[in-house]
Structure formats: C-alpha cells, structure tokens
Image: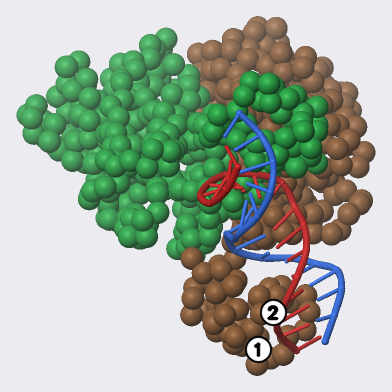
Chain colours: A brown, B green, C blue, D red
Amino acid sequence: MATMADIAQRAGVSLSTVSYALSGKRAISEPTRRRVLQAIDDLDYHPHAHGRALASKRSRTIALFFPHRAKGLSEMHLEFITHAAEAAGEHGYAFLLSTSPDEDAEILRMSGQGLVDGLILMEITLDDPRAERLRDRGFPFAMIGHRRDNAGISYVDLDFADAVETAVRHLVDAGHHAVALVNAAPSLLAAGYGPAVRALEGYTRTAADVGLDPIAVACEPTPRAGERALAELRAARPDLSGVVTINREAIGGMVQAAADLGLAIPDRLSLVAVVTERLAQLFSPTLTTIDFPAAEMGRLGAEMLIRRLEGGEDPPTQRLLRAALTVRQSSGPYRGP
Amino acid sequence: MATMADIAQRAGVSLSTVSYALSGKRAISEPTRRRVLQAIDDLDYHPHAHGRALASKRSRTIALFFPHRAKGLSEMHLEFITHAAEAAGEHGYAFLLSTSPDEDAEILRMSGQGLVDGLILMEITLDDPRAERLRDRGFPFAMIGHRRDNAGISYVDLDFADAVETAVRHLVDAGHHAVALVNAAPSLLAAGYGPAVRALEGYTRTAADVGLDPIAVACEPTPRAGERALAELRAARPDLSGVVTINREAIGGMVQAAADLGLAIPDRLSLVAVVTERLAQLFSPTLTTIDFPAAEMGRLGAEMLIRRLEGGEDPPTQRLLRAALTVRQSSGPYRGP
DNA sequence: CTGTTAGCGCATTCAT
DNA sequence: ATGAATGCGCTAACAG
C-alpha cells in the first residue's frame, strides 16, 4: 500500500507538501499540486484512516448505539440504522454499530478513546441516563427520540402526540363516536417509554378536545394480546367503531379479533396504525396509517450530529416531525396485516 | 485521557511493560502486573484504538456491506446486521456498517487502507463479482449467502432448496395433491438471485421425486402481485390446496386472495412461508413457516470471518443451514399476516 | 523478567 | 510556496 511518503518521493516534493495538497490547508502552486495528484493517481493512494485519526485526533467516525436487549427489532429500526449509515457515508464519515448490552462501558470506551467522534442514541426513555452522562463528559451526541428535559441536546423524533391526534381527528371527522387507543405494553408505559407516554397524552387531550370518552389500553406486543384488547374494548363499548394504535405487533391480532366479532374492516371498524410505510405495504389493501418517517429520522440524526462535529456548535438542533396520514383504499374487508 | 505513558509512570515501569501486561505477549511478574492494573484502574485508562491499529497493523474492526439499493429492507436484514454486530462485539471487534452505493470504491478504500481487517458481504448473486475481487486481492471476507463457485470462500447461507423441499414434503405428507411454489420476482430469478434459483431447484426436484405436477410462478414482492398469483394459480389448477412461498411481501395478498376465493386457511388452503420467526409472529395464528435462521446466519458470518482473522487458516468454513418447519396452530381461519 | 527504541501514517509547527 | 522535524498512542523488535 502506498503511503504519503511514496507519493512525496514520486512527485519529488516533501511529505508535508503532499499533506497540504490533500487538505488544502496552505497554498500549493498549481504545477506541484498537479504532480502530487498525478502521483496519487499513479500509485492508487488512499489515505490511511488510522494514521490520520491518530495525528489529527479526529476519526471521522460516528457510532450508533443499538442495544437490542428487548425484542423490539423491526423494519423501523432497520430504517433508522441504514439511513443514518447512508447519511454518514455521504458526509465522509464511517459508521460504527454497537449492540453491546453493557452500554455504559461502551460509552466510555468509545467516547474516551477517540474511536469515534460522536454518538447517536436510540430507544430514548423520558429520563434517559445515557444522555446526561454524555453531556457531562462534553461528548458530542444526538438522539433519535427525546427526553423530558432536552436542554442542550440535539434530537429528532416523531411527534407521537401529534400523530395520534391526527389519527383520532381523522376518525372523528369520518363520523366515529367511539375511538379507542391501543397503546404499547404496560411495562413500557410504566417505564416512561416516550412514544407510549406521548401517544397517551395526545390521545387524551384530543379526546377531551373533541368531546370523546377516552378509551385507552396498554397492550403487550403480540397478536394474542391484540385480540384480547380489541375483544375487551368492544365488550366494554359496543359502539366502538374506531381504533388507533402504535402497537405494530398487536395489529394482526386486532384484525383477527375484528373478524371474529363480525366487524369487517373498514366497513364496521376503522383501524389506523402509526407504522412505517414499509410495514403497511406488507398487508393487503386497507391499512390506513400515520406514516412513521423512520428513514428521515435516521438520516437527520446522523446529519445533526455531523453538523455539530464539523463546527457549528450550539444551539442544538431539535426536530419533532409531524407524520402524514395515508388512507389506503380497500377492495374488501381487511385481512392484513 | 490517560495514555500508556501515564500508566507506566504511575506504576513505575516502562511503557513496554504496560503494553505487555495488557497483551500478555510476554511474561510479567505478578507484583508488577498488579501495579500496572492498579494504575489502569486508577486513571480509568482505555487503550486508544487508532494508536493500536497503527502500530499493530490490525484494526480489530470488521465491516458489513449492505448496499440497500433495492427495496429489500426487512426484519431479516436487521437480524443479519444486529447479530453480526453482536458477535463482533463479543469477540472484541468493532463493527462498521457500509451502505455505500459505490461498492467497488468502498471495497478498495476499506480493504486497502487498513480501516478494517475483514469484510462480510450480503445479497450475494450466483456469480457475485465482489467475491472474486476480494479473493484476488487476498483480503479476508465471508459471505452471508453463496455463489455458484465458492472455492476458497467462507460463507453461511440458508439451504433454500432444502427449505422448500421440507415445506413441499410436509404438505404432501398431509395429503395435498397440488402444491405450488410462489417464488421471488421474475427479475430476481433472471438475475440469478440465489434464493430464488435454489428455491426453484428444490421445488422442481421434490415435485419430481414425489410425483407432483410442478406449478411454480415468479411473483413481484407486493400484496397485489400475491393476490393475482394465487388467483391465477387457482384458475389454472382448481384442485390447488397447498402453496409454498419465499416471497414475504406477497403473503398478505395471497391470504386476501384466498379469502376472496372462499378458500379458508388452513382448512381449504395450506400456506407455508420461508420467513423469520419474527415476521411470522406479526400475524395472528396460523402462519406455518420454515423458520429463516437470520440471527444465526448473521452471527455465524461474523464468527467465521473473525476465526479466519485470528487463526489465519484455510480451509474456509462453509455452512448451508437447514431450517425447521414450525406448524402454528390455528384458532380459526387465517387472517394474517 | 524488564527497559530502550524504532517506527506505524499522518497533521502540523517551525523554519526558510 | 515548500521542507524538515516532531509527535499522536501504541506494538514489537532489540537489548539486557
């Protein structure tokens, strides 16, 4: 492998001239620059990432923390990851993926030892402790998701409260008088899982605003639980005609229960889910959704981190995305997912 | 940040002693080792990855190439990626994810400049050119998937032919007399997409072996196409009672078509899909599957690469996994996915 | 068993 | 506008 020294020799210049020709950090005469570039081309030279990182104290690498401890793997996470990686690549950054269960140790290792210049955090809880630790260490990071207190922190997130509000209003506008929310798991809600908490907030406030009785249940992420949830909701409210959910794993079960109860979707029951378009498209027609902008979120997460690394310090970028509702036409009763 | 020099000073030993105490590459007396470890603990020292990489010419980093050009993002890919990353982490390797569309340039950059020690390739075609290029360069890599010619190459893949055979035999044993294969897209089949080609092989040979008329169709990865495929198959063969598919995106449509045709699943039509357990579980009961071992494949891919890096050994590891069939009980007609 | 030293490939400060 | 020299943090000879 060619090194800068090889280039220097072949171009008949000094090592530092090659370096400066590459970085443009000081003026180089046109003739010498051409000779350098020619030599680089001849020798198929590519700068050595580690040598550069050592000397410059910048690795041009960012990492995404994805502790997949729970079972929550989905196509949504894949979109976060791939689009964050893609954005990083476009900006000349390498992209490291860490799935270490021992996050604290990893954070120290990565933030302390120059392995990466910055971090992206996912699966943020309302009082996520990792964010504080990184902020205290003064280490650059961005979040996909957000906390209760986000002072000085860059993040991008879906506005779940707004998403649920949009869904509920859509149903109310369509004439529904009883609309329920099927939320994430009880344990997540209790643990302060942001999307669950905010979905409930959005639902509650919208129900109050439009004069609907609030009917919200937390539901385990399984089809089985989805079946039960819908059956119980319907038993309690025989006039139930609309359901909004952020619980993707429960959708299949809710659809099954609807059929078992003789509630054809969308004719006798309307279901609106907050999921990625990719998931919605797995189903045969009739999944009306609030399109989860996972790809955009992944991309923005990486970009706001890199912007911060490149120079533009404070203030942090904070973006709460609003998602659009897509009505997918039905050619008959829903039999999704 | 503490460096090895700081540790050496605090422990009252030389720099190299610290290095050797850490690497274990030469004997260190117990007392000095303890002093060194104590100093490391006191100063919260962590080795600097880039310094180490520069000096040792090994980065302890592997990269996974995931060109997500097509639309083929799914929970299956996520399992490949996260489990490969996890395995890498467990072995002390950092995990780089590259989604660069310009793969050749990336391969050169990464393989040439010491950024990574080895690569994992995905989405392998029957005559994948990337593999040859890497083999010619003598750069360590492993594949998730496999080519027609795999001489000297490490890989792990699902045995699609075997998977389809298992599915067909399962249906035949259950008394079906007309079993069709709904394959991947025509374009993929034509392009030599391994899973599609091998699924067809396995289906054809099994059909011949058990005396079944071969009924195979290639199908675009959409519910719409799935609907049409099933309707057409049924029109051509009114006695069709079993369908095997590797086309996850078409499943929802096939289920819908079945219902529209009055074919209750699983009572009047049996459907067996080669998909991950995670996808199967999105559906309400009754998706019988050949469980796609994506997690295991990701993990094995990383491990066989790392084994090669650590041991430097030929012969390559080549593993064709057989997947088990899981019958999921039905509590009524199928309304999945 | 331990210390001294020479790089690894590059960015950067001093010179000129 | 260019060169020479220093050092980033570490590994691995080379010397005891």
One can see residue A83 in this view: no
Residue B57 visible at all: yes
**Side of A86 relative to A321 (left or right):** left
Q: Nearer the viewer, residue A272 or A240?
A: A272
Crowd rating for badge 1 (residues with CA inside 10 Å; few <14, some 14–19, many 20+) = some
Residue under numbered circle 2: A17
Q: Is residue A327 above or below residue B279?
A: below
- Find the distance from the CA under tag 1 to the CA under tag 2: 9 Å
Q: Seen in the image, is A57 located left or right of residue A42?
A: right
The image position of residue A187, as x and y in percent, is 71, 13
Element class at badge 1: helix
Give residue B173's position: percent from left, percent from top.
17, 17
Q: Residue furthest bottom?
A: A31
Q: Disc 1, disc 2: CB below 8 Å?
A: yes
Q: Is residue B128 left or right of residue A169?
A: left
Q: Which dot marks residue B188? A: none
Which of the pair B196/B60 is nearer the observer?
B60
Q: Is residue B129 above or below residue B250?
A: below
